[in-house]
Image (cartoon, rainbow, N blue to C red):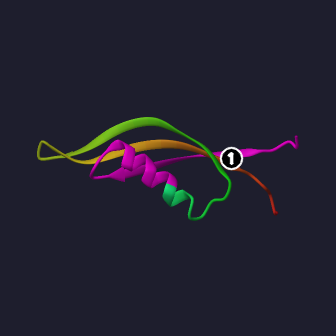
Amino acid sequence: MAESVYKVIELVGTSEKSWEDAAKNAVETAAKSLKDLRIAEVMKLDLRVENGKVVAYRARVSLSFKYSAGK
């Protein structure tokens, strides 16, 4: 098996529906510009609150993708 290198980035996805949608939004948005996505790990979940009501769900996601310098 060939050796590979992976880069890890951190993203925050948001959704008005759920944490699952927030994480999905982060990964799917990243997939539009990054290739060879490998693993996404939800690191932290939080909520945005306005006037005592939850208005958005946020998921902090650590995402890895295969790194290829200049290929």
Give neighbour class at mark 1: few <14, some 14-19, many 20+ (Cα, 10 Å).
few
Q: Quadrant of the N terminus?
A: top right
The percent position of residue 63, horizontal first and vertical second, equals: 58, 45
Q: Residue furthest right?
A: 2
Q: Quadrant of the C terminus?
A: bottom right
The percent position of residue 12, horizontal first and vertical second, equals: 44, 48
Determine whether, in the image, residue 59 is placed left or right of residue 67.
Answer: left
The percent position of residue 5, horizontal first and vertical second, equals: 78, 44
Determine whether, in the image, residue 51 is placed left or right of residue 33.
Answer: left
**Residue 35 or residue 44, whichever sits in front:** 35
At 38% across and 44% down in the image, what residue appears?
20
**Any magenta on residue 4?**
yes
Determine whether, in the image, residue 9 is placed left or right of residue 22.
Answer: right
At 81% across and 63% down in the image, what residue appears?
70
Counting labels gives 1
The percent position of residue 3, horizontal first and vertical second, equals: 85, 42
Q: Quadrant of residue 48?
A: top left
Q: Residue furthest front?
A: 1
Determine whether, in the image, residue 70 is placed left or right of residue 31.
Answer: right
State the extent of the magenta-drawn residues as a range: 1-27
Q: Secondary structure at mark 1?
A: strand
**Residue 21 or residue 7, whichever sits in front:** 21
Q: Amino acid at mark 1?
A: Lys
Is 23 placed above or below 34 here?
above
**Any magenta on residue 11?**
yes
At 42% across and 35% down in the image, what residue appears?
44
User: What residue is pinned by disc 1?
Assistant: 7
Q: Quadrant of residue 31?
A: bottom right
